[in-house]
Image (cartoon, rainbow, N blue to C red):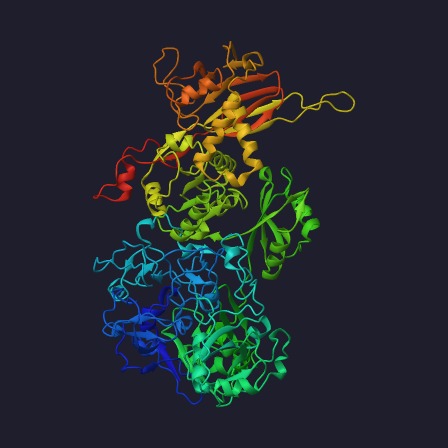
Amino acid sequence: MAAAAEPGARAWLGGGSPLLGSPTSSPELGAGSRSRSGPGSGPGSGPERAGARPPGPAALGHIFRKVTLTKPTFCHLCSDFIWGLAGILCDACNFMSHEKCLKHVRTPCASVAPSLVHVPVAHCFGPRGLYKRKFCGVCRKGLEVPGLRCEVCELHVHLDCVPFACSDCRQCHRDGHRDHDLRLHHWREGNLPSGARCEVCRKTCGSSDVLAGLRCEWCGVQAHSVCSTALAPECTFGRLRTMVLPPACVRLLSRNFSKMHCFRISESATPEPGEGEDSADASAPAGPGREVVVPESSKQTLKIFDGNDSVLRNHSRVITVPRQARNQEVLEAALRAYYITEDPQHFQLQAVPQPAQAVDLGALGRFWSGETVEEEGSRGPGARDGAEAWIIRARPRTQEVLKIYPAWLKVGVAYVSIRVTPQSTARTVVQEVLPLLGCQDEGPESFQLVEALMGSRQVQRTVLAAEEPLLDRLHDIRQTSLRQMGQTRFYVAENRAVAPRVSLFVGGLPPGLSLQEYSSLLDEAVASKAGLVSVSHVYSTQGAVVLDVACFAEAERLYMLVRDTSVHGRLLTALVLPDVLHTKLPPDCRPLLVFVNPKSGGLKGRDLLCSFRKLLNPHQVFELTNGGPLPGFHVFSQVPCFRVLVCGGDGTVGWVLAALEEMRHRLACPEPAVAILPLGTGNDLGRVLRWGAGYSGEDPFSVLVSVDEADAVLMDRWTILLDAHETGSGEDGVADTEPPKVVQMSNYCGIGIDAELSLDFHQAREEEPGKFTSRFHNKGVYVRVGLQKISHSRSLHREIRLQVERREVELPSIEGLIFINIPSWGSGADLWGSDSDSRFEKPRMDDGLLEVVGVTGVMHMGQVQGGLRSGIRIAQGAYFRVTLLKATPVQVDGEPWVQAPGHMIISAAGPKVHMLRKAKQKPKKTGTPKDARAEGTPAPEGDSK
């Protein structure tokens, strides 16, 4: 037995990345010769010595051979063109290299990459899409057909390559398994921007021709594979370090939840590989990402399964071999299809009766003899669709060499290798491993053996029984799936009970109830267990609660049940929320809380959602259509200092500001400054704060830098009390009285023709939402509805009464009355005008005053938006009372409705809000970003005013 030294292992196991150390030798290759490298775990093989020095090509799992090039080809290491007719190709993963570059190769083959991952973390694959000029991270071929993309990291894969992708996503939180405070670079290979520059040599490291170059998915540093060894292994999170929520400061025990649930990512309808296909067998092609072509007459197509599981699911891979091929050649091709580089002598092929769906796994067909494919096929089971089906079986083994990893990090070895015999059990393995890990004084009864299946979509851990025979366990895994055997790892862990604690956010409940009423309502709706579930937080005004669940199984049951439950005709929302360890946050950390409305800006909202998840910690990015802003503010409630970025239109900004106002007294940072990324149609508040008329595809990284350098300013918020006297008549002739309603206003409030146009636009969008994905189209609809009402007249001044500061104000002949808080209305128009007037003060958005302006109709509004006229100045004040004599259209910050007759009272809404205004000047080259922000900041963040 042998132990692998930790210092060497960290160089190529760090940060969850499969990146390896520098090679020490290169295989000798001749024309047509091969160099096979594999785990070496066959019968009788000695214990492995790994990690003592950086691995060379022989430890990278590649099957290199010299090939003749028939088309333009580029090196996957240096990305340069390969001149001449010879290149070096890996038969398993398609890695192509110059012969001179071979000694510098550090990228592992897809066949061994799962075994080199430091901390296994599953991926979050989104919906299938066509990603141009991207390359698969498994087979290294271009994504010429629709593929998948991880929503958290930059991994792109073909659909049929998903089962072979290693679980090397970013570790974004503590989950109780191998947690650590040291953050290493998390390298991802290829798919870099075309202009990417190496951090070390400053030369181009990106390529649009091959999968080449490295990028850290936390700090964004880019480098050549060879140059990356010159960089410090520790990651500092780069330019966005003060905005990123450090993973070491986030805790989420997520044993039974997928990463999609943990990061609140909407489930996609992407089928598993082999499901939902038109073909009867739903098989995957041999060449990943390529179509299955009709073989030549001299060749035959075979369907290959890797175990009982793939036979039951009917998930096969297809290989094409010569009809005269011998057993060894066919077996090697079958192993390559599943990225298995072990010695073929340890495997054999077994026939699968057709149809595969009805096969009895206990009565499979014969094993393949030494005859050719053509000779075997003449006596074998009948081919289906011209293709026979075979299953790869591992030959029985009397002993194996197994790697055992410590489940804690502060130990002098990365793993130890021991020999497993028929007498080996989980208990004896633990007894043998503990002295090698420096725990000889510890009793074996305090430890247990944990089996981890590191799937690309989910990492599953199973505690093995103390007396379970380990050799039989390995045999069962190989019978189930040879692919899964390569993705299975064994840990020795302390046998201590983990106190489960899962926070579940439940929204969509009736507002205004007490804690006891919410508890009773949930007991009735989902039958929550009183001893395991308690209500920790109640947000009565928003109809939401946060549950503390002390059992993983109960948390999973509640999560799935709540999402399918309706209360009072309204579907409930369930979210898994993390805990932010605010005491562990660095002193200079000011994380950014991001809210994105994916319905705003067409498809740009969804693209931004994915981009911000990758640039920041996905735990700090919230989708507003999934629970609103409340879950985000709850997660950040104990963070002492943070900022907010709202991606959406003016209505979305108002929604977040209203939630912030309600949550203010519960926040450790009661005055977080709010930035805007405008995605709506008008975006008036974004214009005033210099964020632009609308997002037009700027680099999301540059947006985050601008937020970090923005200045804090103050803005008034206003409360509108809607007190309707009558909403209709009941059966007895008595008028029904509607209870008063309160709304918040940031930009403006319109009564009359302005609100009527907004209402018509809103109704048109509700009827055909799919057409309203373009800002240009939306403005065109506004023009159309305006032209339809150009001759409309309702004499609004006769239907309303206005009091300013409790003083009656006589209204001129107008069709619309507008209260404005900011110097932008109707997509950037200055409704108040720039002319000086001794009767009024110069408007500011933090002066505690509203300006009242009238418009005479649609024509007047058009002239204002064209800059030809301004509105009719009526009044300026801090308290207004409007009496509606008839039902009248009203809009607040672009959200319209028809208000019943009654009163509208507008007054200041308490403390001013802190907004972020984009800095005019470019960031200075000298001085720190903090110094730049300190200059000219009118309102220091955190001050209440």
Which residue shows up at 60% across the image and 75% down it?
356
Which residue shows up at 33% across the image and 59% down it?
216
Horizontal and vertical percent position of residue 370? 48, 90
Out of 550 and 417, give the one closest to the viewer: 417
Horizontal and vertical percent position of residue 652? 48, 37
Q: Is residue 750 visible?
A: no
Which residue shows up at 53% across the image and 82% down it?
475
Which residue shows up at 57% across the image and 71% down it?
314
Residue 332 found in image quarter? bottom left
Out of 408 and 468, give the one closest to the viewer: 468
Horizontal and vertical percent position of residue 428? 50, 83
* Looking at the image, residue 363 lies above or below residue 242: below
- The number of numbered badges drawn on the structure is 0
* Looking at the image, residue 532 lies above or below residue 592: below
* Looking at the image, residue 33 lies above or below residue 666: below
Lateral position of residue 864 relative to residue 781, left or right: left
Lateral position of residue 869 relative to residue 498, left or right: left
Q: Is residue 637 visible?
A: yes
